[in-house]
Image: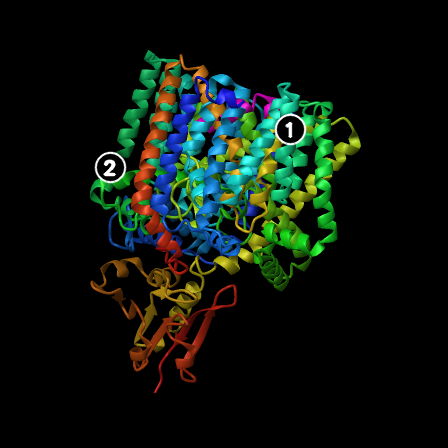
Amino acid sequence: MKTKYIIVVILLITLLGGFLRFYKMTENPPSLTGDEISFGYSAYSILKTGSDEKGRFLPLVLESIGDYKNPLPAYLMILPIKLFGLNEFSVRLQNVLIGTLMIPVLYLFIKDIFKDRRLAITGAFLLSISAWHIYFSRFAYEPLIASFFIMLGVWCSMKMWDGGKKWAFLMAFFLMLTMYTAFAPRLFIPLFVIGYLLLYLYKKGVKKQSISMVTTFVLSSILLGLPLVYVSLFAGATTRLGMVFLSKDIEFTRYVIFHDLQSFTEVPFLILFWLKRYLNYLQPEFLFTNGLNMTLPGTFGLGLLYVYELPFLILGIIYFLRTKIPYKPIFILWVLIGIIPDSLTNNQQHAGRLLHIVPVVILLVSFGLLKCIDWVKSLPKMPLKIAVTSLYTFFIFVTLIQAFLVFAVHFPRHRGESFDEGLKEAALYVRDNQDQYQEVVFDIRRGIDGPYLIAIPHMYLLFYSQYDPHTYQVEPKIIGSDRPLLHFNKYTFRNVDWTQDRTKKNTLFISSPWGIPDKDIPEGWLLKKVYLSNGLAAFNIVAPKD
Amino acid sequence: MLKEFWKKDNKLLGLIFVLKFIILAFVIESAYPAHVLSENLLFSEFFGKSMHLGVLSYYFFDFLNIYLLWLISKQIDKRYSLLAPVIYCICPWFSYLTVFGSFYIYLVSVFLVVALGLILITKGKIKVGNSLFFIGSVIAIYSSIFSILILPVLVFSVIFLKKIKFSQIKVALICLVIAFLPIFFLMVNNRAGLQNILHNEITVFSNPGILNTVNEFRGSSQDNGFQNLAKIGENKYVYSFKYLGIKFLKQLTPSTFFTSQEKLFDYSFVPPFYLSLVVPFFIGLYYLLYDKTMLKLLGLSFVLVVPSWLSLNMVSLQRLVLFSPVILFVICFGFIKLWEQKKSQKIKVTLLVVVSLTIFQLLFSFYDMSGFEFERYTRIHHESFSLDIE
């Protein structure tokens, strides 16, 4: 195929991928998550004042409620916020752009490594329509950005041995950049790099040139990683590790050892439990039906791959194992180590924290797809070829329809609450009507059936009212020590106790329907009901009257 | 064949029996009285005999399985004939099923007899092979409805793969057809009985979840104006196909066999096979990729997961034990491949690590069983646990 045609094809594939990522990106996912809001307002605050909302000048770690966040996503948001203002579009733009950009970059990566344009085009196309990649490209999710840098870093690592020191530096640059972007790479990168270098030196032997490359890489990494060491040791960024480590897993503490990990003799239980988690990534439900968690558990949502990709994946793995492929051990290492960070956390498997292995998975599926196409071509009779192709195309068509319906219909209905749906509407109501009240009280607990979610409504209020960051940084705040409480200006964020709070006049209350039950709201007090996409009520906005 | 039992390496087999006896005793001790399954109590009540009489028969079949695996292994490769029995002996899956009195331990014995018969035929021992094949098949057909599906597939596949000529098995097949006639007429004449059996055994469609999902999803899609797309993409056929496909894959997932992902008797943390054995398993699988016939045989053996596939739960470890000999032989194949390359330092270390970890896990599972397993049982079944056995 001529180069200009290939450019057109790649452009079309990228446009398709871009469309699938851009289209209605501000409405689906249905609401900005707490993380997106935090990143957005931090970026806004840095843009306006040079400091985050806590007043830290150009922070290397962003302190959130009981959590710490990586700084790079917020810094990347600054430019879109400057250009388009503080809104959903600006917050999500970086992910959508990087998600789209990954398509042609993956093409170039595969083409460069395998010298096979057909494989590269297939890979780019599969990535462009991958539900896994589309989903995480449509909202501000930092592991997606990290996965882009990881791909670039690994690519540079493959070029490094023949290409010179600039590749060693670039490898260090991209890989270290990922560690400022998301938490999973902080474990993945060191393990991968150590494994990679040992593997290479073991295979090729220790030579003068390789020593020089490794030295350049290590020195660059140390230089670029120094701030990270500081942040990890002194700025509380290790808090998250303690919060999410596997030993705190509910299943482990409740059903395996019946208490928190206490003695050395219980460590083998933890190791076995971890290995179980690790192997669970091969579970078919996770891979093909509900790995993306876009619908409720037990229903048919979307997995990391479409069901029709199953035979391609199996064939691809077989082909990969049986054929001589450049950098085969590196790809194996990439996947095997890539699973480790997520497997060590105390949640169920999370497709988002596996995004850095997307290129390898797509590569395997591409191998399988091309093998299948070759097989169909080799069939002896044309009617047979047509029959097989038509049947499978129909299967693909049905699967894609289902995927579309999951994205367009079921995901907002099933997961609206997880995306903190309703808080925007409530925050906007407060912004527009606050002048009529002396105090605004926002319940921090939420959940349709009960108080099982803790939200950060103050961040939504700051975000949607575009609250002046400087004012927020310097104004006095009351923060509860023994119970959840935050008060600034006229806003109070705490648990609402309606039996007592109902007597407070000139106050606007926002709480879930179980916090302020409908039956306990006298006529005329209910100002607005905020609903989720599934039609269930998320909030009652109430003002007590005389 | 019985004479062979007492020959040279049979002392080692005797040791394996002793080890199995110790492991069984340990499992009984740790699980008591959780292992008293309600259905065994029911049978005991029904027949008016001691429950232990029935349970003892499972011990017999468990030991018989070891012996049959040894005989089969001998036919495949004499040098490694003790490998499969050792792995069978130490792995908790079989011990648990035996102690809990699972019917499928008995069915494993029957299928192993059938397999031994077929292997003997391929080795030219036509008479003994045919006899064992016939006896095993008849018992299987009269024991489980699934055998009526599994056996023909197995037989036709070995003929199709040219492992056995039709002429070699002709007599046994004719006898089998004749032996099948009574149950066939019984099924034809007693439709209600057959339906009852099918209803009890094939419970995969008893799950109302699929239909509920279809209804809920279609309703939502229609509300959003996508009724035509919903008709194509969200109907019960598409979802059932998807569900069955995923459920089938689930039967073959490594974590099902090597971790406690699917809990034995819904509570245990002990895996069916020790996790360290996943290494020889993958190595065995890798080498199988290069042998087209073996790969085809492996593919055809998937028919053994059908009983578990058609159960209500995503995976039924009781039913899936029918497939366990296949996993066992893949592990053995991996071990043999490793052993054949033992001159390499890397392989030596791998072998050593795998064996050490397996021994460690065996010992650790003793610790786990004695200290934690019963507590897990009571935690998970605390509401239904009301047995009071003196």
Crowd band around label 2 with a 10 angstrom C-alpha radius: few (<14), some (14–19), many (20+): few
**Which of the 4 image quarters holds residue B245?**
top right
Q: Residue at x 42, y 63 (%)?
A: A424
Residue B360 in the image, given as x and y percentages of width and height? 32, 31
Q: Is residue B130 magenta?
A: no
Residue ID for mark 1 = B131
Residue nearer the viewer, B312 or A420: B312
Q: Which residue is mark 2?
A: A229
Q: Where on the picture, by quarter, is residue A158? A: top left
Name the foreground residue: B284 vs B138: B138
The stretch of residues the image draws in magenta is B280-294
Q: Which disc, if any, is residue A288? A: none
Callout 2 amino acid: Val
Determine the image quadrant of residue A65.
Answer: bottom left
Label 1 marks a residue whose chain is B
Q: Position of residue A67 (x, y in %)?
A: 29, 51
* SS at badge 1: helix
User: Is B284 contained in the magenta span?
Assistant: yes
> Can you say which quadrant of the picture contains the C terminus of chain A?
bottom left
Quarter in which the N terminus of chain A is drawn: top right
Mark 1 is surrounded, within 10 Å at the Cα level, by few (under 14), some (14 to 19) or many (20 or more) other residues, namely: some
The answer to whether residue B269 is above or below residue A111 is: below
Point 62% across, 54% down: residue: B199
Dominant SS in magenta: helix
Picture residue at 74% right of the left edge, 23% below the top: B167
